[in-house]
Image: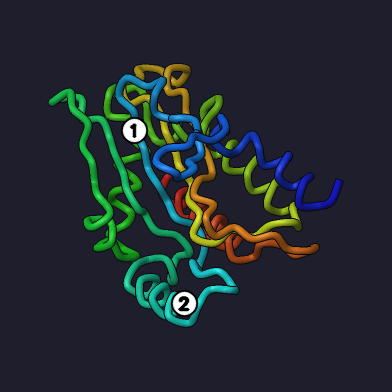
Amino acid sequence: EGAPIISLRNLAPFVPRFYGTLELGGITYMKLEDLSRQYKNPCIIDVKIGYQTWYPSATQSHIDKCKVKDLATTQSKLGFKICGMQVYDRPTDRLVRADKDWCKLLDCDSVVGPLQRFLNPPSSQDLSARDLCFGEGGLLGKLEDLEQYFERQRGHQFFSSSLLVVYEGGAVQTTDLNLQLKLIDFAHAITVTNARDENFLNGFKSFKSFLLDFVV
């Protein structure tokens, strides 16, 4: 097997499960796992990774469009941006959503608040960002596992892909969080020969470092 196939096999634990395709109205759709289905009150965040969101073979007009969007957000400065977010508000027993238009307004300073809000489970005074990140099955361990994959793999590069983090907002102890970290959105992933994905990896490391700065 070639490097791209091996790379994809090793990536499998980090992506939603694939359940085949579905034909509707002459259009073929992929059937993917619904990552939020198992949660009662899912806290979710979508974080686009990479300092560059356009792929090498893109048209100049697409590249120019991406550059404008990246410069207007934290993408080109921090190597990541929040695309969407949902948290559970225990006092009102409802899910609060931040849409992509609101997320576009976040800059390098204001992005800290939403990340801190997401990482602090609202349902128990006994749980904190440290529990969510460093506890058993926590976010840090999952980030390190995915980082190791990208340090090794040389068969693919991912442009404009995101990390999706999900956990149970109603958890009252660490074992109830059931935190998941998955890589999503592969429309602009490309196959390469013996080349590390520096753009994704650098953005990923920036995001991880950014989290640790205010959790530790």
Q: Which residue is mark 2?
A: 63
The structure residue drawn at horizontal position 41% and vertical position 72%, both measured from the top left corner, is 66
Q: Which residue is mark 1?
A: 43
Quarter occupied by residue 117: top left
Q: Earlier in the sequence, mark 2 or mark 1?
A: 1
In the orientation shown, which residue stands out farthest toward the left? 92
Label 2 element class: helix
Label 1: few (<14), some (14–19) or many (≥20) C-alpha neighbours in 10 Å: many
User: Marks 2 and 1, Cα distance to the nearest angstrom?
Assistant: 33 Å
The structure residue drawn at horizontal position 39% and vertical position 28%, both measured from the top left corner, is 36
Residue closest to the eye, 23 or 164: 23
Tell me: 208 left or right of 196.
Answer: left
Indicate which label's residue lies in the foreground, 2 or 1: 2
Is label 2 in contact with label 1 (beta carbons under 8 Å)?
Answer: no
Quarter occupied by residue 89: top left
Q: Amino acid at mark 2?
A: Ile
In the orientation shown, which residue stands out farthest toward the right? 1
Tell me: 201 left or right of 191.
Answer: left
The tag on residue 90 is: none
Label 1 element class: strand
Q: Is residue 189 above or below residue 58?
A: above
> Can I make out residue 216 in this image?
no
Colour pattern of the rendering: rainbow
> Can I make out residue 178 in this image?
yes
Quarter occupied by residue 142: top right
Residue closest to the eye, 107 or 20: 20
Q: Amino acid at mark 1?
A: Cys
Residue closest to the eye, 20 or 42: 20
